[in-house]
Image: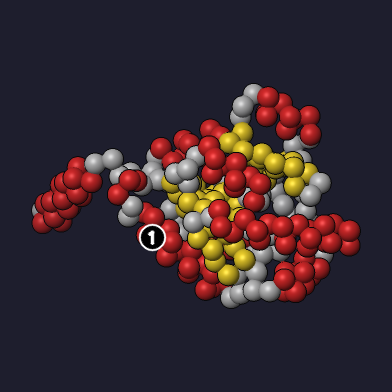
Amino acid sequence: MDGGFLLVLSGPSGSGKGTVSEALMKNNDDIIFSTSVTTRTPRPGEVNGENYFFATREEFEEMVEKGELLEYAFVHTNYYGTPKKFVFDEIEKGEIVLLEIDVQGALQIKEKYKEAVFIFLIPPTMDELKSRLVKRDTETEDEIETRYRNAFKELDFVGEYDYFVINDVLENAVSSIENIIAAEKLRVKRHKDIKKEVQAEEERDKWLYHLLKN
């Protein structure tokens, strides 16, 4: 079965991208998370290779030179990028690859790979966004202010995305994204030969019926 695609989820820092992504992964076995590489310092509890691939700036620059990244950007004070091979290998298998990145990276991907599906996650209010940044207690006051100012700039790019989802109640935001995924799976362009797929399903059903009958 065809139908694999890249699902790009982005939005301002504090919009809840990480929380929403975790919930999507927990609820859906057919979604594969694309782990990004970054030069930032790991936060408490983060595991190299699971949350991010943590690299030095020299290692990151070498990946850029070798063309190993689908996109990369300098965000706030660090580099972030997406390993190319993993993404395309999984899409070829028919998998949905979830990529959680910032606006800069999303726009790079849109320019190079228009087949991706782009979702912009929006906080209910900007006051709530700042409150979330403060409560997570992972940045200094200066870093919080930088992220807050950048959030206003990033909201200007909502029009570049296919969909937007307001992350007020987590369950509702996740449900909205799952509905988007369900619709995107049925796009005709994602299936090379629908007739063959239908026939294959029919043959499988006949085989199962014969197996159970005997």
Q: Residue at x 45, y 49 (%)?
A: 96
Q: Residue at x 56, y 34 (%)?
A: 84
| Element marked by disc 1 | helix
Residue at image mark 1: 182
Q: Position of residue 180 (x, y in %)?
A: 43, 61
Report the coloring of the rendering: secondary structure
Residue 127 relative to residue 104: left or right: right
User: Which of the two residues, 204 or 104, is positioned nearer the viewer here?
Assistant: 104
Residue type at numbered disc 1: Ala
Q: Position of residue 57 (x, y in %)?
A: 79, 34
- How many discs appear? 1
Q: Is residue 60 visible?
A: yes
Residue 71 relative to residue 214: left or right: right
Residue 183 relative to residue 138: left or right: left
The quadrant in which residue 165 appears is bottom right
Considering the image in quadrants, where does the N terminus appear?
top left
Relative height, residue 75 to residue 120 (above, below): above
Furthest residue to the top? Answer: 66
Q: Residue at x 74, y 37 (%)?
A: 55
Decide: few, some or many residues near mark 1? Use Cα within 10 Å; few <14, some 14-19, many ≥20: few
Q: Position of residue 44 (x, y in %)?
A: 78, 56
Relative height, residue 64 to residue 132 (above, below): above
Q: Is residue 53 visible?
A: no
Relative height, residue 94 to residue 149 (above, below): above
Residue 157 relative to residue 77: left or right: left
Q: Residue at x 59, y 59 (%)?
A: 158
